[in-house]
Amino acid sequence: MLGLSFNDYKLISSNAPRYVGLSNYQSFLADQQVAHAVNRTFVFLLFAIIFQTTLGILIGALFWRNDKLRGRRLALTLLFTPMVVTPVASALFWKLILDPNFGVGNYFLQIFGVHKIDVLTSSTLAFPTLLVVDTWMWTPFMALMTLAALGSVPKAELEAASIDRLPLFTVIKTVVWPHAKFILMLGILLRSIDAFKTMDLSLIMTDGGPGDKTELIALSLYRYAFKSFNLGYSSAISVFLLFIAIALTSIYLYVLNLKTRKET
Amino acid sequence: MADDFMKPRRKSGPIKLSTLSAWLVSLIFFLPIAWIIASALKPKQYVLNFPPKWIFMPTLSNITDAISYGNTAKYFLDSVIYSFTAVALAILVSFLAAYSFSRFKPAGTDFLMFLLLSSRFVPAAALVIPFFQLFNLVHLQDSFVGLILFYTMFSIPFSVWILKGFIDGVSTKFDETGFVYGASRMHVMFKIILPQLRPGLVAAFVFNIIFVWNEFLFNFQLGGIHTYGIPVGLFTSITKDGHLDWSFVASIGTVYVLPLAITIYAFQKYLLVGLTFGTVRGEV
C-alpha cells in the first residue's frame, strides 16, 4: 500500500504502475473535495464521540447501579445487539424505517405535527441522521466500556466512600475516575479510530449524498479505489488515514502517561 | 416503628424507577431491530402501509420464501463454511504464536504485538486494494481457499492478543513442572496450558466468528458468486428481481440478526473481551 501510493496506477488503463514520487500526495493535498471530506469526517468524529460517550456513560452507570435487575441478561442482550449487527445490515434497516413514503419514522414525525420528509436526501438533515444512526449503533459499546470501567473500581474503596458519606461528585473524582479512566479512554480511542473509518453506513444510506453532504473520507477512498480504480491515489489517502490513526493513538497514550506521572 | 415502616418504601421507590429506565433504554435501542422483525412477520400487503399497520396476523411465509429464494440458503452455507474453517485455523496458529510471545518473549514483542493491531487502524477499503491485486495474481478470487486464507489472516491478530493475555495469566510454574516430569514442549502446550485457556478460546472463537460473519467488503470484492456470504446477500437483496422488496429484505435481515442476538445472550460474559480486541478483560 505504501509502495503503491508513490505510483500512478489505474486499473482501467493497461499501463503498469509508474513511479511518480510524491505527486499523488501533492494532488491529494490540493484536492478540495478530499479536504472537505476530511473536515466532515472530523466533525462526524467529534459529535459521534461526544454523544456516544455521554450517553454510554449514563447508560453504563444505570446498568451498573442495577446489578440485580430482573432479566438483566436479556435487557443487556437487547441493548448490545445493535453493535454486533454489521453496518451494512443496520444501514438497510434504517433505510426502511426512514423511508419517505412508508417508513415508520415519518409516521412518528407526523404524530408530532411535522409533515413527511425524506431525511436521507435532505441537505440539512442527512448528516445529522447519519450521526443518529451511528450513535444508535455505538452507544451500547460505550455503555459496555463504562460497565467494564466501573467494574474495575475496587468495591472496598466504594464502600469506604459511602461510609464516609462523601458527596457523589467527590466519589467520582477521587475514587471512580482514577480506576475507570483507562478503560474509558480505551473505549474512546477505539471509537475514534472506527468513526474515522465509517464507510458502509453512508455508502448504503445516502451514498455520500445529497451532493457531498455525507461524503466521509473512507467513502471517498472506496470510490477512488473501486469506482475510478485509481489505486495510487487511494493508497495515498489510506496512508494519510493511517497516520491520523497513529496520531490519535499516540495522543491517547501521551495523555494517559502524563496523568499517571503526575499522580506518582 | 414509623421509621421502620418508612425505610423499605423509601428504598424501593428509586430502585424501581431505575429498573424501569434500564429496561426502557434497552428497548429503545432494540426498537429498530424489533421493527425489522415485525416487518418480516407482516403479511406482504401490509409492509408498505402508511400509517403503519400495528395489528396483524403474524406469518412466517415471508421468511420461508426468503430462505427458499435464489441464493439465500447458499449465502448462509458459504458464510458458515468460510467463517468456521478460517477461525478454527486462525485459533490454532494464534495459540502457537501467543504461546511463543508469552513464554519466549522474542526481541521486539511489544512492537510486533502493536504491528498485529495496526491492520485495524486503516479503513478496510484501503486494505482491500492490495489483496485484490494479490488475489488476481494468484487466481484465488471467488474460491473458498482464498477466502479462508484471508479470513484466517483477518482473525489472527485478535486471537493472538486475546490468547496472549490468557497465557500470561497461567503461571510458568506449570510449564516448569511439566518439564521436570519429562514432558515435551508440545505436551506442555497442548495438554497442560491449552485446557486452562478455555474462556479465552471461547471468546476468541465466538467473536472471530461474529467478525468474519459480519465482514462485507472483502467478501464482496474478493469473493464471487460461488463464495458470497450473508452480508453480501443482504446487500444484494435490495435489488432482487430489479425492484425493492422490503418484506424480502426484512426477512433476510431477521434471519441474519436472530443468530447474532442469541449468541450475545449465550456468550454475554465474553462480550467485553471480544469487542475490545482482547485488550480489556472483565465481565459485565
Image: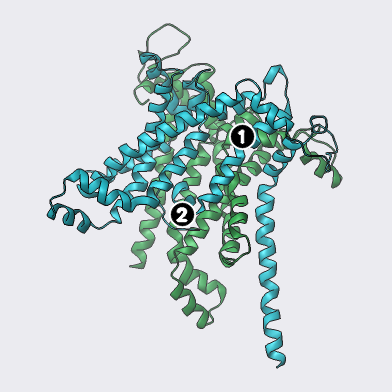
Chain colours: A green, B cyan
Q: Residue furthest bottom?
A: B1
Which corner quadrant of the image does residue B115 belong to? top left
Q: Position of residue B195 (x, y in %)?
A: 32, 51
Residue at the extreme top of the image, as rendered: A14
The residue tagged 1 is A89
How busy is the neighbourhood of tag 1: few (under 14 within 10 Å), some, or many (20 plus)? many
Question: Is there CB contact under 8 Å for labels 2 and 1?
Answer: no
Report how far apart the C-alphas of labels 2 and 1 lie in the structure.
28 Å
**Residue B65 versus residue A127 in the image, above or below:** above
Chain for disc number 2: A
Estimate the x, y position of residue B209 in percent, counting from the top left.
Answer: 47, 38
Q: Nearer the viewer, residue B196 or B125?
A: B196
> Residue B76: x percent and y percent?
55, 29
**The N terminus of chain A sits in image quarter:** top left
> Dot 2 corresponds to which residue?
A185
Please state if B43 lies on the left or on the right of A206 as rendered: right
Question: Which image quarter: residue B22?
Answer: bottom right
Indicate the secondary structure of the residue bearing disc 2.
helix
Image height of A100 relative to A46, above or below: above
The quadrant in which the C terminus of chain A is found is: bottom left
From the image, state whether disc 2 or disc 1 is nearer to you.
Answer: 1
Q: Amino acid at mark 2?
A: Met
The structure residue drawn at horizontal position 51% and vertical position 34%, both measured from the top left corner, is B213
B155 or A2, nearer to the observer: B155
Instruction: Kindly identify the residue that appears in the image at 21 percent across and 43 percent down.
Output: B186
Numbered mark located on residue B26 in the image = none
Mark 2 surroundings: few (<14), some (14-19) or many (≥20) residues within 10 A: some
- The chain holding disc 1 is A
Residue B142 vs A246, above or below: the answer is above
Residue kind at label 1, given as amino acid type: Ala
- The answer to whether residue A66 is left or right of residue A239 is right
